[in-house]
Image (tube, rainbow, N blue to C red):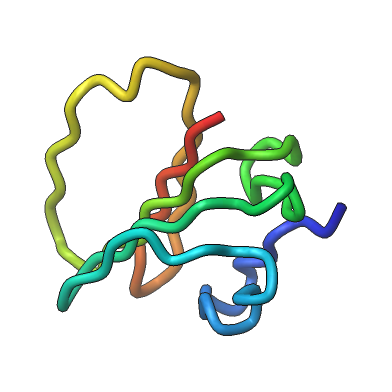
């Protein structure tokens, strides 16, 4: 299983072969990790969903599961497990 590398930022196109786009708007994307192909950049474990945001602020309701947060210079990534 390949771990998502955020050391030089995050570009979803580098991982598109294993991520399914669920929803996208101007500043956010929600993706599904198909068949647990990738590991979380924060904890190294497989994740279910990935929320990517370029917004300065975000509000989340209770995801109902464990989650990790990772940050690049331009984006915030929230990964649910």
- Taking 81 as reference, is 39 left or right? right
The answer to whether 75 appears left or right of 72 in the picture is left
**Residue occupying the point 35% across, 67% down:** 75
Q: Residue at x 52, y 74 (%)?
A: 10
Residue 13 in the image: state x and y as whole percent. Answer: 56, 83
Query: Quick one: which residue is furthest to the top in this view?
Result: 64
Q: Is residue 71 above or below residue 62?
A: below
Q: Nearer the viewer, residue 29 or 72?
A: 29
Give above or below for 57 relative to 23. Answer: above
Residue 69: % across, % down: 45, 41
Residue 73 point in image, percent of width and height: 39, 72
Q: Residue at x 32, y 24 (%)?
A: 63
- Residue 5, picture quadrant: bottom right
Q: Is residue 37 left or right of residue 26?
A: right
Q: Quadrant of residue 8?
A: bottom right
Q: Is residue 42 above or below residue 25?
A: above
Mark count: 0
- In the picture, the quarter occupied by the C terminus is top right
* Residue 78 x %, y %: 41, 45
Residue in view at x 19 percent, y 34 percent: 60
């Amino acid at each position: 299983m390949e771990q998502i590398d955020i050391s030089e930022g995050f570009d979803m196109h580098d991982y598109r072969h294993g991520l399914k786009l669920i929803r996208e708007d101007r500043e956010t994307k929600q993706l599904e990790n198909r068949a647990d192909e990738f590991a979380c950049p924060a904890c190294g474990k497989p994740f279910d969903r990935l929320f990517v945001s370029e917004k300065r602020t975000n509000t989340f309701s209770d995801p109902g599961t464990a989650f990790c947060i990772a940050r690049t210079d331009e984006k915030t990534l929230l990964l649910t497990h």
